[in-house]
Amino acid sequence: MANKEEIEAEVAFDDFLRLYPADPKVPDALLMKGDLLSRQALPPGRDQGKTREAIKAYTLFLEREPGTPRAREMSGKILELRNRLALHEATVVQHYITRKQYESAEARSRRAVATYPDVPVARRFTPCSCGRSKNRGRRTTRRLPGRRWRRSIPIQGGRSRSPYRASPGSIK
């Protein structure tokens, strides 16, 4: 959690930006606010509000000073923060899969791929397909990055069967 000085600094940056929008020091204030917020950002799997605020501050900085050398550095920081958000989405999808909420995992992964197409993590993150397959109405799933096995998945009728086990009637 942020300490008292960081909270006061964030409030001071917000006040400065609100009271003096035409000041020549506004880009510097946006840069410092973005740095402060990116230091306060929590790891993937936790609340990413500060990460989103830091991206917003860096984006406003880029709008004010688009062609400067600092702008290239801020573009790199924005990409790094967007990568953190994509990792957060992957963490949430994994949580849904461990809780066997496959439809939620599929929706969240599709949204992540659509939201972060330019991020390196999103390129290897493919949405899982938890819909009905064409073979006999069974549900199927596709592997996520880093997983080498398929989880057992619910089949119509309430029973759960691993795709690697033989059906009860096939063994003689």
Image (cartoon, rainbow, N blue to C red):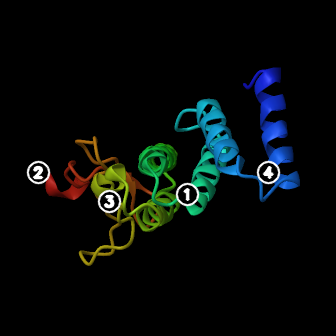
Q: Earlier along the polypeptide chain: callout 4 or callout 3? A: 4
Q: CA distance from mark 1 to mark 4?
A: 16 Å
> How many C-alpha atoms fall within 10 Å of the one at disc 3: few (<14), some, or many (≥20)?
some
Comparing 59 with 135, the one in front is 59
Q: What residue is pinned by disc 4?
A: 17
> How many C-alpha atoms fall within 10 Å of the one at disc 4: few (<14), some, or many (≥20)?
some
Q: Name the residue at the bottom extreme.
A: 134
- Kindly report which numbered mark, 4 or 3, lies closer to the viewer in this rendering: 4
Residue 6 position within the rendered picture, expressed as x and y whole percent measured from the top left: 76, 27
Q: Earlier along the polypeptide chain: callout 2 or callout 3? A: 3
Q: Amino acid at mark 3?
A: Thr
Q: What residue is pinned by disc 2?
A: 172
Q: Amino acid at mark 4?
A: Leu
Residue 18 position within the rendered picture, expressed as x and y whole percent measured from the top left: 85, 54
Q: CA distance from mark 2 to mark 4?
A: 76 Å
Comparing 23 with 6, the one in front is 23
Q: Earlier along the polypeptide chain: callout 3 or callout 1? A: 1
Residue at the image position 33 percent from the left and 54 percent from the top: 125
SS at mark 4 in the image: helix
Tell whether 17 sits left or right of 106: right
Q: Earlier along the polypeptide chain: callout 2 or callout 4? A: 4
- Kindly report which numbered mark, 2 or 3, lies closer to the viewer in this rendering: 3
Q: CA distance from mark 1 to mark 2?
A: 74 Å
Q: CA distance from mark 4 to mark 3?
A: 40 Å
Q: Amino acid at mark 1?
A: Glu
Q: Amino acid at mark 2?
A: Lys
Q: Earlier along the polypeptide chain: callout 1 or callout 2? A: 1
Looking at the image, is 40 positioned above or below residue 160?
A: above
Q: CA distance from mark 3 to mark 1?
A: 35 Å
Q: What residue is pinned by disc 1?
A: 65
Residue at the image position 15 percent from the left and 57 percent from the top: 170
Q: Which mark is residue 126?
A: 3
